[in-house]
Image: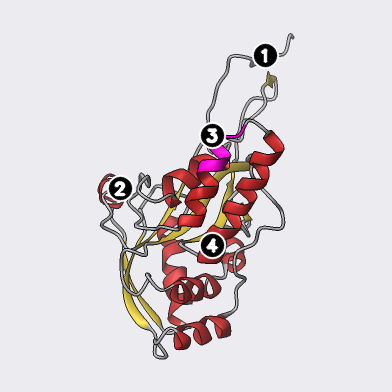
Amino acid sequence: MQGLRPIFLVLSPAYKPLDNPKVRRAITHAIDRDRIIKHILEGYAYPLSGLLSPQVFGYEPSAKAFPYDPEKAKQLLTEAGFPNGFEIDYYSPTGRYPKDREVAQVIVEQLSKVGIKANLKTPEWSIFNTDYKNGKYPFYLTGRGSLTDADTLFQQYFRTGMTRRVLGYSNLKLDEILEAQQLTFDVKKREKLLWDAHKIILDDAPAVPLWNAMDIYAYRADLVWTAPPDEKVQLKTAYLKAK
């Protein structure tokens, strides 16, 4: 089943040249998520064109990140003043997400094709988890679990001064929308505001959507249980069929 956790790349505008939106968009165009899903994840993932799973409140099918287009990536890098590309450190946790190290290696390869030399760093999770929360990484792979409402992700990563992950991103128009949706009790109006916020984030590209993992469970044939999308195994309502 499709889980709630989005896997994505974070591009921190606090570090040069990621402060340039054209550079961030170029990186988005350079990533071929479909190839990674097919050849590295063996098809056990759902590609994301936005940052949200369809089960999350605030999801809108028409919200789309920039598609894979290496030639467009090269064009944007040239426009940004980097016709020969640039060099940057890229961080990926090891053992946190399915095949995260292998995924990181492919991303490095894909970036090299548009002229970006990504120096791969793969710290183990306890180190990664401390350092990225303290804003030490310019460019990294991460995920957000138990995500049922878009507000949670948008506030933590993209609202000025409130980013739990110290992303260094700021967009005042986005801040206004995120505040407005928190103050309305009209569900439809709030949903529309989240759609607007999502489109701003995707256009500004401080993050590159990748995929939702396919959650796979194995259990006895005589167990009656419904797997949840939030990765939490709760057995309160589970029971064994009578023999």
Amino acid found under the numbered disc labelled 3: Glu
Residue 118, percent from left and from top: 35, 74
Q: Nearer the viewer, mark 2 or mark 4?
A: 2
Q: Earlier in the sequence, mark 4 or mark 1?
A: 4
Q: Residue at x 54, y 26 (%)?
A: 233
Q: Measure the C-alpha gap from mark 4 to mark 1.
A: 37 Å
Q: Nearer the viewer, residue 132 or 33?
A: 132
Q: Earlier in the sequence, mark 2 or mark 1?
A: 2
Q: Nearer the viewer, mark 4 or mark 3?
A: 3
Instruction: Tell me the residue that label 4 is attached to.
Output: 40
Q: Quadrant of residue 198?
A: bottom right
Amino acid found under the numbered disc labelled 4: Ile
- Of helix, strand and loop, which mostly describes the magenta segment? helix
Label placed on residue 231 = 3
Q: How many marks?
A: 4
Amino acid found under the numbered disc labelled 2: Lys
Q: Quadrant of residue 40?
A: bottom right
What range of the chain is rendered magenta? 179-184
Q: Are marks 4 and 1 in contact (CB under 8 Å)?
A: no
Residue 230, percent from left and from top: 56, 34
Q: How is the image coloured?
A: secondary structure
Instruction: Tell me the residue that label 1 is attached to.
Output: 240
Q: Is residue 125 left or right of residue 187?
A: left
Considering the numbered disc 3 on the image, is that residue within a helix, a strand or a loop? loop
Q: Measure the C-alpha gap from mark 4 to mark 3.
A: 22 Å
Q: Measure the C-alpha gap from mark 3 to mark 1.
A: 21 Å
Q: Nearer the viewer, mark 2 or mark 1?
A: 2
